[in-house]
Amino acid sequence: MTEQTVLPTILVVDDTPENIDVLASVLSTRYRVKAALNGERALAIATAYPQPEMILLDVMMPGLDGHEVCRRLKADPKCSHIPVIFVTAMGDEQDEAKGLGLGAVDYVVKPISPPIVMARIATHLALHRQNLELERKVRDRTEELLETRLEIIRRLGRASEFRDNETGMHIIRMSHYSYLIAQSLGVNDSWAELLFNAAPMHDVGKIGVPDHILLKPAKLDPEEWRQMIRHPQIGAEIIGDHSSELLKLSKEIALYHHEKWDGSGYPHGLKGREIPLSARIVAVADVFDALTSDRPYKRAWSIEEAVRLLKEQAGSHFDPDLITIFVQILPQVLEIKKMYGEQEELPLSPFLARGLV
């Protein structure tokens, strides 16, 4: 064994020092041994860094007995993963079943047989390490799949912006604005992050709108408008039905972000809190950034003009509570706007605004 080899640490818990000495003499050739004479000390060692890789635990101890120690170990996320082997004189089947039911991986009866103890420890350490490696691989694969899914969503969102003469910075900014609003509402962090990652899909349905309508510089006629307002439904159909929470929220946003607080929006004419919170938030973020950004068919509005419109439309287009929050966080919004500004000036033309916001 080289000097660099780190021996696995085994924690031996027994209220009788002689029993600890016996186990330590058996284990010391292959393992580093720590000892605890009572349950309280065992719990302290198990939760401290570096943690033992395995615990050999007596059952009959004063104070906290082995069963209670095992129960507490398995209830604590910091040490629930550590395999426990009961080493005890209590040898009937009911005792063994109780110990295994508490989460122990094995049960060794005293007086111990050194070869059996060593074999059991080696087996369960190997299984434990295999499980840890499997969990790591599953975690890495899950993260990889999530990142792939996020990248697909970002790319689809970017595709919709290309169709509408907008820029990739728009979906980045409005996603950040949506996240800030959600945070200010006090929602949990995981939902706010989900919203941030789903928001870029809000206009993916524009992929299905014909170019002569989507890119028309003049006001749309009634038939063209009927086709334009189908894009939320098209977006929902593109995303489809999935068990993924991210894709569920993306579909919800795509379908409902053009609904209005007073019921005059589309495609379903939902009103007030019938409109999902995600869509109400994205509506504010999307319109503000569209108003304050240059487009080939219009110049950017000033911040003051855009905020004035949001306030005027609170209670008709927008959830009034969200507008109040948006005004409160405006300094943070403007920091995001500056951070993710356009990389170059867009060519301006005298085209008329098309009234799509």
Image (spheres, grey):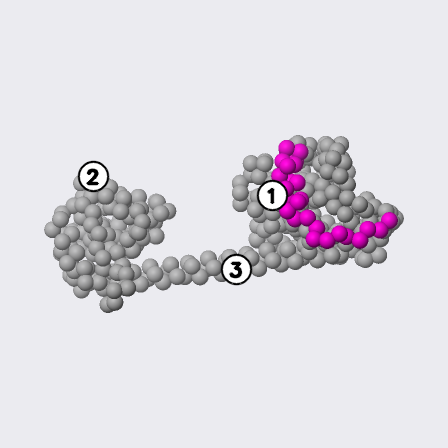
Q: Which residue is mark 1?
A: 179
**Residue lying farthest front?**
344
Mark 2 residue type: Gly
Position in image of residue 210 (x %, y %): 80, 57
Helix, strand or loop at disc 3?
Answer: helix
Is residue 237 among what the camera can see? no
The residues colored magenta run 325-350
Mark 3 residue type: Glu
Specify whether residue 329 is painted magenta: yes
Disc sitting over residue 63 in the figure: 2
Disc sitting over residue 308 in the figure: none
2 or 313: which is nearer to us? 2
Q: Are marks 1 and 2 in contact (CB under 8 Å)?
A: no
Q: Residue at x 66, y 55 (%)?
A: 239
Q: Report which quarter residue 357 is drawn in.
A: top right
Which image quarter holds the N terminus? bottom left
Tag count: 3
Q: Report which quarter residue 135 is drawn in.
A: bottom left
Q: Which residue is mark 3?
A: 144
Helix, strand or loop at disc 1?
Answer: helix
Q: Are marks 3 and 2 in contact (CB under 8 Å)?
A: no
Q: Gap between marks 1 and 2, in whole Å?
A: 51 Å
Task: Give left or right: position of 117 versus 186.
Answer: left
